[in-house]
Image: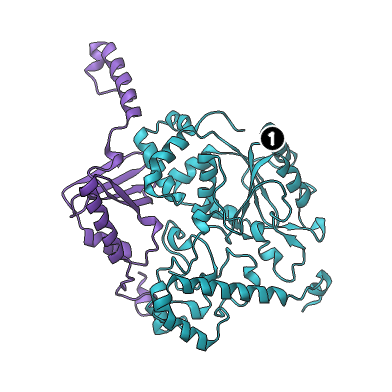
Chain colours: A cyan, B purple
Amino acid sequence: MATTKTLGEVLRENGVTRRGFLKFCAATASLMALPPSLVPALAAALEKARRPSVIWLSFQECTGCTESLTRSHTPTVEGLILEHISLDYHHTLQAASGDAAEHAREDAMKENFGHYILVVDGSVPLANPGYSTIAGITNRVMLEEAVKGAAAVIAMGTCAAFGGLPGAAPNPTGAVSVGELVKGKPVINVSGCPPVPLVITGVLAQLLTFGTLPALDGYGRPLAFFGQSIHDRCYRRPFYDKGLFAESFDDEGARKGWCLYRLGCKGPMTYNACATMKWNQGTSWPVESGHPCLGCAEPHFWDAGGFYEALSVPTAAIARTATYAAVGGVALGAAMGILGRTTRQKATAQRQPVSVDELEQTP
Amino acid sequence: MLPELATACVCPESPVPPDWGNTLPLLHEIRHALQRLIETGAPSAIDLRALPFGPGDEAQLLAILGQGEVTIAIEALGPTRIWETAYTGVWVVEHCNTEGARIALCIEVTHVPEILLSQPGDLDRALIALDGALAASPADLSGRPQSL
């Protein structure tokens, strides 16, 4: 359960010196995408931060978001933050099961009513309540119960934020996002399939540190991590500006690390922190590994056309825009984002709903 | 590298890291920060993890900055390595966790990185600990310093 101890008190009890604390703050500032000049302010806020209760609900999901979180490799930062929060219910991670687990959730909701952070991964099925239940409780009912006493709701991963893969056409379960059901409470969408581990803990750190909601974009995502497109932060961007593209996965352009736009990269329409925070201890990220961005942090990415089809721009237009790129720079990236959205809208309009019976009849 | 990869038809990476063009603008930023330090005394810090580096960019930058006279190791929540580059006042601060994995990498343009200074909170605790040691018997003082 949540306690009244501050993070500073907890750290000192664990023998962490002020110098160690400053180091922790420097790493946390980097984690939260804050400039290093804000480290002193962060230290003052973290010193006084109190331990919040967190209830984590998992609905129609693959556990990838939890895997991402628990496999983050910087234990002195994420570990301290995660140890500092009181994770009172997470049915994948907790030792308790059955009635004991559900009682833990009910107790945490009662004792911390109005103050706990509700994290949800997975979408919510509306077509048939029986598609996804926990302890016989439908996802929708459990969500609505838990939301009542939550201070804030974090929709973790693209499924919770936008419906994700369960919501892809033909959406047999009638999956909806958390934000479509939660009214009257702030919802922070942390999209990605899965989200970057550092982004997950960065958002938790923001709530823990300042007790305020981060600035959000039009899709409810924290601007600190989703404020710039993959394209604009991509180290391969100079090749795009010069009109140098890989045309296949083993041609000269691919070997020389040229832009992957023509191989279907969705970087121009995708907003996420992969290009800077990277994955696997900062080792690499999809584009650095030679694979186009799939756009997994965007709504309806699964229905936005083929992963390996270039954003819908005629060949002639690509050549023309490549010429303009040397002059247009960032503005062109924005234009490509708009073209990408047009592609998504077109794909959405072309959905052909089918029933579960029809799906089962498919050979 | 696995020996099989050397004879593979497709080389997974170019043997010579290309220049992605990120180093030069960063060097200009460091130069401006250094000029600001000289003229106003204002320190600057650049979080290298927030920059979209390509493969080899970081190594290239650190190679150009070089190694100066001072190298310092701190052991607090895992190792931290700090060194002054060949350009006086330009420091590299690398924080690692207890498992040795890097958790932050910064360029600090300053006279002395903040984390090297003794912190007021720790000074208070040191004074209390020293008072405790002085109040103890001489036999206790002859031993090794007590842990804070």
Crowding near the residue tagged with mark 1, few <14, some 14–19, many ≥20 C-alpha atoms within 10 Å: some
**Relative to residue B75, is residue A354 depicted above or below?**
below
Residues A255 and A29: in front is: A29
Q: Is residue A159 visible?
A: yes
Front one among B101 and B86: B86
Quadrant occupied by the C terminus of chain B:
top left
Residue at the spot 38% in from the left edge and 74% down from the top edge: A238
Left or right: residue A39 versus residue A363 is: left
Please tell me how many numbered marks the rendered image carries: 1
In the image, is residue B12 above or below residue A185? Answer: below
Residue A27's spot in the image, x, y percent? Answer: 40, 46
Judged left or right of residue A304, residue A70 is left
Query: In the image, is residue A165 above or below residue A21?
Result: below
**Image mark 1: chain:** A
Q: Residue at x 51, y 85 (%)?
A: A317
> Residue at image x 23%, y 61%?
B63
**Residue A59: x, y in percent?**
70, 54
Residue at the front extreme of this rendering: B39
Q: Nearer the viewer, residue A259 or B146?
A: A259
Instruction: Name, please, the residue furthest toward the bottom.
Output: A316
The kind of residue on which mark 1 rests is: Phe
For the question of whether residue B98 can be seen, the reply is no
Q: Which residue is mark 1?
A: A113
Q: Is residue A97 left or right of residue B55?
A: right
